[in-house]
């Protein structure tokens, strides 16, 4: 596609902190290249705001390569914007047309309190992982990678679940603000492997309890989470998590 420039109207959520009242502010930006990333476009606007003596828009970012999960933005009503299986940092401005109005908001969930503007506190995910997203083994010397046979279907499913980058798009898309897709990916990642079996029941019980403690909603299996996940985590992981949770409840060793 040929390169082109555009003029856009941005309606961006501004909020000083979690206690203050937020509002939308409208900005006009022009000379925006179709080949810029969405974050580069925000960078240009922020440079202008700084020169004008205004407070730049706060937003989260790190790798800008679709790996870290930091670039959490709700763009025109969809987490990470209009492109399928794409993080905000990998969304390019050719996804929009000259003259478009773009509405940019933070994740909306009790479990993700707003820090400032588009930045939310996603440390709840860290605490959920700390509750059970690990295995306890005495490794000793390094063993050969093929010493422990693993069923290929399980290995593939575990690898796919491990692709979760904990961005929170699943929570932002869910009408209940459920973190079930994220949690089920972390549980499946370890639960499908032999190394994760000793703590499988304790893991699901403790991690689900922590998720509930953090204030995330319940899953009603609408599938919105799977539709917006930038790493295409399958909703079947949630079914696996429910099965593990039931089994753990019936087990005497949890």
Image (tube, helix red, strand yellow):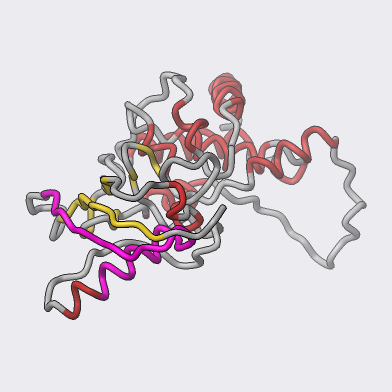
Q: Quadrant of the C terminus?
A: top right
Q: Position of residue 161 (x, y in %)?
A: 63, 41
Residue 73 is one of the magenta-drawn residues: no
Q: From this viewpoint, which residue is outermost toward the left?
A: 21
Decide if residue 51 is on the left or right side of residue 97.
left
Q: Which residues are magenta?
A: 23-47
Question: Can residue 252 be spotted in the picture?
Answer: no
Looking at the image, residue 213 lies above or below residue 136: above
Which of the pair 131/239 is nearer the observer?
Answer: 239
Looking at the image, residue 56 lies above or below residue 2: below
Q: Position of residue 207 (x, y in %)?
A: 48, 39
Q: Position of residue 134 (x, y in %)?
A: 60, 51
Number of numbered discs overlaid on the protein picture = 0
Decide if residue 221 is on the left or right side of residue 251.
left
Q: Residue at x 26, y 45 (%)?
A: 101
Looking at the image, residue 30 lies above or below residue 211: below
Q: Residue at x 48, y 49 (%)?
A: 166
Which of the pair 36/159 is nearer the observer?
Answer: 36
Decide if residue 133 is on the left or right side of residue 206.
right
Q: Residue at x 49, y 61 (%)?
A: 35
Q: Position of residue 17 (x, y in %)?
A: 15, 58
Which of the pair 13/245 is nearer the observer?
Answer: 13
Looking at the image, residue 59 lies above or below residue 232: below
Residue 197, quarter of picture? top right
Q: Residue at x 41, y 19 (%)?
A: 220
Question: Can residue 70 be spotted in the picture?
Answer: yes
Residue 37 is one of the magenta-drawn residues: yes
Decide if residue 189 is on the left or right side of residue 61.
right
Which of the pair 181/147 is nearer the observer?
Answer: 181
């Amino acid at each position: 596609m040929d390169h082109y420039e555009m003029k856009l109207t941005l309606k961006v959520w501004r909020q000083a902190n979690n206690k203050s009242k937020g509002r939308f502010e409208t900005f006009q930006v022009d000379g925006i290249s179709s080949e810029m990333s969405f974050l580069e476009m925000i960078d240009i606007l922020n440079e202008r705001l700084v020169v004008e003596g205004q407070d730049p828009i706060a937003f989260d970012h790190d790798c800008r390569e679709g790996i870290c999960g930091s670039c959490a933005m709700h763009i025109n009503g969809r987490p990470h914007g209009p492109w399928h299986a794409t993080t905000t940092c990998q969304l390019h401005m050719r996804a929009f047309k000259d003259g478009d109005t773009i509405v940019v908001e933070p994740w909306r969930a009790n479990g993700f309190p707003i820090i400032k503007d588009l930045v939310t506190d996603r440390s709840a995910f860290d605490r959920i992982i700390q509750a059970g997203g690990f295995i306890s083994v005495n490794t000793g010397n390094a063993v050969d990678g093929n010493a422990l046979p693993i069923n290929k279907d399980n290995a593939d499913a575990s690898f796919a679940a491990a692709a979760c980058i904990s961005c929170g798009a699943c929570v932002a898309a869910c009408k209940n603000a459920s973190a079930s897709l994220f949690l089920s990916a972390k549980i499946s990642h370890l639960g499908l492997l032999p190394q994760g079996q000793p703590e499988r029941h304790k893991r699901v019980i403790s991690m689900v309890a922590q998720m509930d403690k953090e204030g995330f909603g319940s899953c009603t299996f609408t599938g919105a989470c799977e539709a917006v996940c930038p790493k295409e985590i399958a909703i079947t992981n949630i079914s696996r998590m429910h099965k593990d949770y039931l089994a753990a409840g019936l087990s005497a060793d949890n």
